[in-house]
Image (cartoon, rainbow, N blue to C red):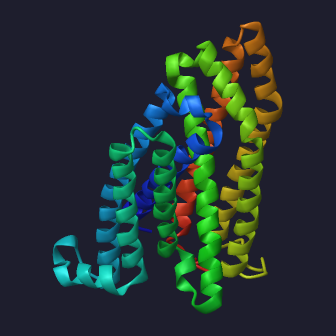
Amino acid sequence: MDGVTVLVRFALYLDLMLVFGLPLFHLHALRKPERSSMLARKLSTLTASAAIVGMILSAISMVLMTKAMSGAADFSSIEQHMFEMMLTDTPFGLAWCLRMAMLVLSVLAVLFLAQAPTWKFGMMSLAGGVALATLSWGGHGAMDEGARGQLHLAADIIHLLAAGAWIGALAVFILILALRDGHDANNVSLLSRTLNGFALVGTLIVGSLLMTGALNYWLIVGPTVTGLFSTPYVQLLIAKLVLFGMMLALAAANRYRLSPVLERAHVSGKHQEAVAGLRRSLLIETACACLILALVAWLGTLGPMAD
């Protein structure tokens, strides 16, 4: 395993999920007056910053992929025509070019649509979603052909977008808690409302992740478990599922236990303890999400039957 490749893949997953998930949360969770608030401005700045970081990470990823595909002994041995061939003659390269264009578009939306927040965040979310979807051409789904390949890519894209929506929401919840230490009455009210409002979106996200995850397993491994549990691929996959189960449990606790406590505490004005409990839960959930992305980055470098 190339540790640098896994690290760059992990960083790209996390970064592009934020580029997509942050503006998406703005669209589905914030009311019209809130779309020009301090929180909205911070989301705009963070998304643009993540898009710029995404360009840098994508450039590094292209260099690593070109080195691997060309069989070059070191980076200095990579010739210019190898990059040209990767960019123009491979699906990975074409997807990379599309990603870079979408990341540039996301930054331009921040710069030129500042007076139209709904259009701005809509453009950023669309561009971020396309950029995130291009990561599918660097995974197992790109290895299949024909109808099977199209199905696999579609499942990968839906899986990525659902995960990005969840990661983006977690980031915004933590950001709201960080604003004025999360104890300002307006922030607590916003947090309580958006947490409750995320229930439907969260259900759609979880359903999408479960269905596409099962489909991806079937397409990569097949309808069998015989002899697989001794392979690193399935061992890492089991670890991913355990972490996902922990995220589901924490999300359920946030929705059905901590959110009602926060709502009641907000009414009484004594919300410090409720905010602290919610902050701990969200930070643990976010840590689980980051570990899952690290495992996904690792899994993408392995074959299901690899020893």
Q: Report the residue that reaches farthest toward the front.
A: 115
The answer to whether residue 128 is left or right of residue 58 is: right
Q: In this view, does 88 lie above or below 12?
A: below
Q: In this view, does 184 lie above or below 105?
A: above
Q: Which residue is drawn at 80% across and 16% down?
A: 264
Please provide percent x and percent y for residue 104.
33, 57
Q: Report the residue that reaches farthest toward the bottom.
A: 146
Task: Give the image quarter of residue 154.
Answer: bottom right
The answer to whether residue 94 is left or right of residue 263 is: left
Q: Which residue is drawn at 60% across and 85% down?
A: 149
Residue 14 in view, yes or no? no
Q: For the N terminus, which image quadrant? A: bottom left
Residue 40 in view, yes or no? yes
Please provide percent x and percent y for residue 103.
38, 57
Q: For the C terminus, which image quadrant? A: bottom right
Q: Which of 296 and 59 is in front in this view?
A: 59
The answer to whether residue 281 is left or right of residue 103 is: right
Q: Which of 115 and 12 is in front in this view?
A: 115
Count of marks overlaid on the render: 0
Please provide percent x and percent y for residue 242.
72, 53
Please provide percent x and percent y for residue 225.
78, 76
Q: Which of 300 and 105 is in front in this view?
A: 105
Task: Give the image quarter of residue 275.
Answer: top right
Q: Residue at x 35, y 71 (%)?
A: 97
Q: In this view, does 280 lie above or below 24?
A: above
